Amino acid sequence: MKKLILFILLLIQIKCYINPVFGQGLCDKGGGGFELNPAAGCAPLTVQIINKIGGTSLYYAYDYDGKSENPITIKDPKDFFYSVAGDFRVLQNANVNGREVTHCEQVKVYETIRINAGVTSCGGGSVKLTLEDSRIIQAYNHVEINWGDNEKDIWSKGNSMTLDHNYKNITGTPPVIRIKGIHATGSACAEGLEQRVTVVFQQPLLKNIQIKSVEMKGNGNLEVSYEGLTSIATDIMSSNDGGTNYVLGGTRTSGGTQFYRIANLNTTQVYKVKLASKDLCGGKQDSEIVSSMVLKGSSADEKNAISWNEYPDAIDFQEYRLMKDGVVLKSFTDIKTTSFEDDDVQCGDNYEYSIVAVTKTITSTSAPVSISTSLSSPKTITEAYVTVNANDLIQLTANLPGAGSKTNYSIVIERGVDEKANYKKVNTLYGETVFEDFNVKADNHSYCYRLIYENACGQKSPPSEPVCSILFKNEAPLLIWTIEKPFTDEIASYTMIQKGSGGSIMEMDLKLKTQYHPDLGKQSDKDYTFQVRADSESGSFQSFSNIINYKRDAEVFAPGAFSPNDDGYNDTFEVKAEMYKTFKMSVINRWGEVVFHSNDILKGWDGKIKGKEAPVGAYIWHVEIVDNLDQTVKKNGSFVLLK
């Protein structure tokens, strides 16, 4: 039921807005009457509808085709809006005293859209104006052209769409041509909107026809990019004899950015390229000359040697860009720089290079050159660093011979096995430069290493000079280290690196001293670490010692119980201490008697008194220590003897 009601309401709504009209010759049926105000005018035009018959059910069609039996109409509109030009018929359909009547009136909307036109010009003041032949220009009776120099011309239908004009004075402000369509005298619309075209004389424009870039491809094609002008003939020319003679490659007349390919050239030959343009009046203009670039390359000693020709235009020169595998490797701002050695390469690998000359206005790119890196003999590793990270960890870091990011290589690590400088291989690194040696006791020994570099071509270098760790010891009150050089290069200096637990860091240049007396009396951190670094005179070698932990106060550790029952576990009572010079320990029973005493920290109480087993129970221990700052530290504690 609801759907039926909605359908009926929809029919009523349609009846209110669209009145179906039946039959033919609706304009001729007659009986109606209305006026249009205005009945003609310039687009866009609003036309008011004035009803003259009264009546009811007034409907209007704003553009009746004169033959439709059922045109779309609108109920009693006040006006119609016409946005475009044309001849329109307005149909009235009404009901007068129960009789259907009709009437039609004509609306004339005149064109006002601007007329499209283009102008070309040349030296001497001659110009050609070309009007666009379209529906718009044909809607006007004629066209008025004001040349901007107090002279006018009239274009009429049937005339040529191109008009010539000569300016007698072409200095100063460029003239502006004003163009507008004119309707016939007495028309309701006099004229259309005005089109303005600024004249730019061709002679200066010819200078804008310039080369933007040249690029020599590997197949011998020289690609030229340039800026052209529409309808201006431009010759693309090249010379291989320094500019004495030029050969025509081709001619283009298109405007905007253009590309032209000169084929079958020699990639190792320098060419000069220019453009020759001719305007409508026969005037000629050559562009600036652009030189092509040629790059040459070779490889030796694991370096790629690259050279190129000097660009001839030094006035506008900005830089050379050396490209490697499509990425800028290095830039050179000196026009005289024409060579470079690339050592960021790897034996056996291929690299593609090109050179780009950049000026203020152009770029010139050479053909790419592929170089396979070779090596007569591999270089020895001359830079290596040793760092003691822990008692059981020494880190060895090598710098590869030559610069760069090599990946396909190996490094053989050898470690000294005795004082006779005999070395044994301990590891091989593949594509890495850091070796961590866990098979060490760096707090007890100094370790020396040699390195053998093998490049991607399988060539091995001689072993490097030895680089050694520094053995660092605490022999209170002094910190001392090995006097032997950690590398064959001369030592420039030793540096003591002191770090406090509170974050303080100090580095002290000790020159060539091999001992150091810590003075911590005026410092506030509780704990410190010390490490020695040796630097070579050449700067190629460094060596770091093991780290010594240094505490201001001695620390004492004692167990809470022990069981001397000969089971091999916890059979001896021992007190442990750190950072001390002298040590004394006593064990006291509950009656205050000393039942055990020792001046040796390694000698503990076995639970016997005068050779007999001591009774089970509680005991007191007392320790007296002189620490590294010569301070006497006394500490007590209790423990239990168990069975």
Image (tube, grey):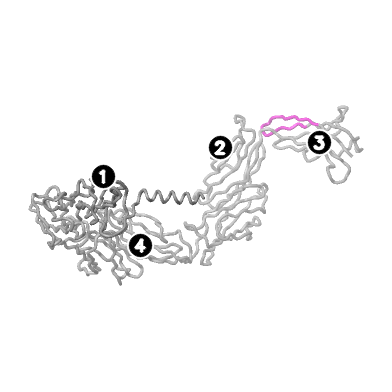
Direction from residue 166 to residue 110 in the image, left or right = right
What is the magenta range? 623-637
> Which residue is under mark 2?
506
Report the number of numbered marks. 4
Dot 3: element: loop
- Alpha carbon distance from label 3 to label 1: 123 Å
- Residues packed near mark 2 inside 10 Å, few (<14), some (14 to 19) or many (20 plus): few
**Residue 493: x %, y % from top left:** 53, 44
Q: Amino acid at mark 3?
A: Gly
> Which residue is under mark 3?
560
Upstream in sequence: badge 1 or badge 4: 1
> Which residue is under mark 1?
54
In this rendering, which labeled residue sits more in front, label 3 or label 1? 1
Q: Nearer the viewer, residue 97 or 436?
A: 97
Upstream in sequence: badge 2 or badge 4: 4
> Which residue is under mark 4?
307
Q: Amino acid at mark 2?
A: Met
Image: 610 above or below 375: above
